[in-house]
Amino acid sequence: MWTTVLTCLTGFGIFQHGGFGKPHALGIITLLALAVGALAGRGVLFGKWARYVEAIAFSASFLFHWIPAFTETLTRLPLGAPLLPNADAPELKAITGVLFVLYLIGVGLQIRRLRGGAGTLSPEPARAGS
């Protein structure tokens, strides 16, 4: 968590392309998600919903890592001929949409597991005699 905080804070100085922009907003949203997740993890403010809020918030911060990862990689590599021309390329919007759908699926599975429903990620223990 602390490395994500440090990355966000140092990122504010790196993304200087004519003032406040999308990377800055994403950094602030990431920090807010981390703060909400940390508060929820300590049982502050959310009561019986704390586990769910924590899972949603920390998963969101993970999603927010992937957005700049794809953007920076696809607009810079390969050197001299990047795959995408800029951060506003329609392909990046599609990738972000797919990432968001995967986030929703992941959060849904986590909530299901937290509720104790079927589809948990760990297999059932082997029974004696089977």
Image (cartoon, rainbow, N blue to C red):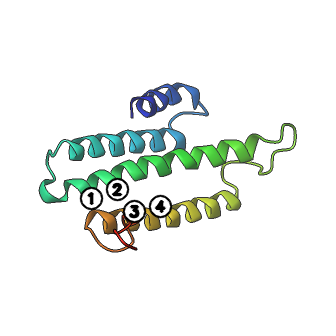
The 10 Å Cα crowd at callout 4, few under 14, some 14 to 19, many 20 or more, is some
- Which residue position is annotated with label 3? 107
Disc 3 element:
helix
- The residue type indicated by label 4 comes to Tyr
Residue 21 visible: no
Residue 39 visible: yes
Closest to the observer, 102 or 76: 102
Residue 56's mark? Answer: 2
Q: Earlier in the sequence, mark 2 or mark 4?
A: 2
- Which residue position is annotated with label 1? 52
The relative height of residue 118 versus residue 8 in the rendered view (above or below) is below
The single residue placed furthest to the right in the displayed view is 80
Disc 2 element:
helix
- Which residue position is annotated with label 4? 103
- Residue 86 place in picture, x, y as percent: 72, 48
- The residue type indicated by label 1 comes to Tyr
Answer yes or no: do the residues labelled 3 and 4 have beta carbons within 8 Å? yes
- Image quadrant assignment for residue 93: bottom right
